Image (cartoon, grey):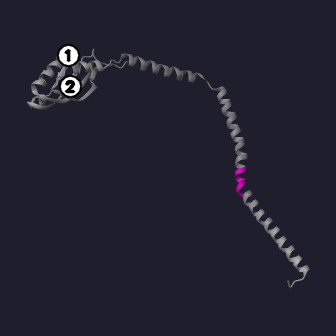
């Protein structure tokens, strides 16, 4: 049993409902206010940038329509010139494998090659640097004479250090190739 009269209970219930509805509207208004505050800059940014984007698009269309295609044609000609130069350089290049096969054919079983380096010397000629190990000095001297007798060889430079030991000698040679055998001259 309640101590309040029925009319007071109805008034209290009505007051609770009104307070809930007014609290809901206050929360809704605060949420809308926050949304308006935080979304307004984005809205103005979109509205103001839309015209700028349209102007940029129109400007790029106009510049594309007015663009001179002669520069593109010149660029294509330059690329074609470079490609033709590369192809002619490749045609001038001589294969090195047959030359290495000839040098390998004069090698003896007592000679072990550990390092080869092809390098360009002055005047467009090339030299081959060879390092290795020979089990006997006589085998190395025979190998040296065989290299000198090859038609592709202009000269063979052998330091005196190569002849200091009788057995297990480490050697290094510089074999200068004839220009007709292997060369490359850059045309200007």
Quadrant of residue 180 within the rendered picture: top left
Would residue 49 be seen by someone viewing this image from the given angle? yes
Secondary element under disc 1, as helix, strand or loop, is loop
Which is more toward the observer, 106 or 48? 106
Pick out the residue farthest to the bottom: 3
Q: Which range is magenta?
A: 37-43
Q: Quadrant of residue 26?
A: bottom right
Q: For mark 1, does the 10 Å Cα neighbourhood hold few (<14), some (14 to 19), or many (20 or more) residues?
A: some
Q: Is residue 188 visible?
A: no
Task: Name the side, left or right, on which 87 lies relative to 180.
Answer: right
37 left or right of 103 in image: right
Q: Nearer the viewer, residue 155 or 55?
A: 155
What residue is drawn where x is 90% and y is 80%? 6
Quadrant in the picture for the C terminus: top left
Q: Which mark is residue 85?
A: none
Instruction: Give the residue at x 13% y 29%.
Output: 135
Residue 39 covered by magenta stretch? yes
SS at mark 2 in the image:
strand
Where is residue 102 shown, x and y percent of the image? 24, 18
Left or right placement of residue 84 versus residue 73 in this view: left
Q: Is residue 48 above or below residue 143?
A: below
Residue 40 x, y percent position in the rendering: 73, 54
Helix, strand or loop: magenta stretch: helix
- What residue is shown with label 1? 150
- Residue pictured at 77% horizontal, 62% vertical: 28
Whichever of callouts 1 and 2 sits on the residue coming sooner in the sequence is 1
Tag shown at residue 174: 2
- Which marked residue is nearer to the observer: mark 1 or mark 2? 1
In the rendered image, which quarter is residue 36 located in? bottom right
Image coordinates of residue 101 in percent, x first then y, are: 25, 19
Is residue 97 shown above or below 29? above
């Amino acid at each position: 049993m309640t101590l309040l009269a029925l009319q007071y209970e109805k008034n209290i219930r009505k007051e609770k409902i009104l307070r809930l509805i007014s609290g809901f509207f206050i929360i809704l208004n605060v949420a809308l206010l926050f949304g308006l505050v935080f979304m307004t800059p984005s809205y103005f940014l979109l509205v103001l940038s839309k015209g700028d984007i349209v102007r940029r698009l129109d400007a790029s269309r106009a510049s594309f329509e007015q663009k001179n295609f002669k520069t593109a044609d010149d660029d294509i000609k330059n690329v074609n010139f470079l490609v033709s130069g590369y192809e002619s350089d490749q045609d001038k290049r001589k294969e090195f494998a047959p030359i290495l096969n000839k040098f390998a054919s004069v090698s003896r079983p007592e000679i072990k090659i550990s390092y080869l380096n092809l390098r360009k010397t002055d005047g467009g000629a090339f030299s081959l640097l060879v390092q290795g190990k020979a089990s006997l000095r006589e085998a190395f001297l025979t190998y040296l004479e065989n290299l000198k007798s090859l038609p592709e060889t202009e000269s063979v430079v052998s330091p005196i250090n190569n002849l200091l030991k009788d057995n297990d000698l480490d050697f290094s040679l510089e074999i200068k190739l004839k220009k007709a055998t292997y060369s490359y001259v850059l045309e200007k």
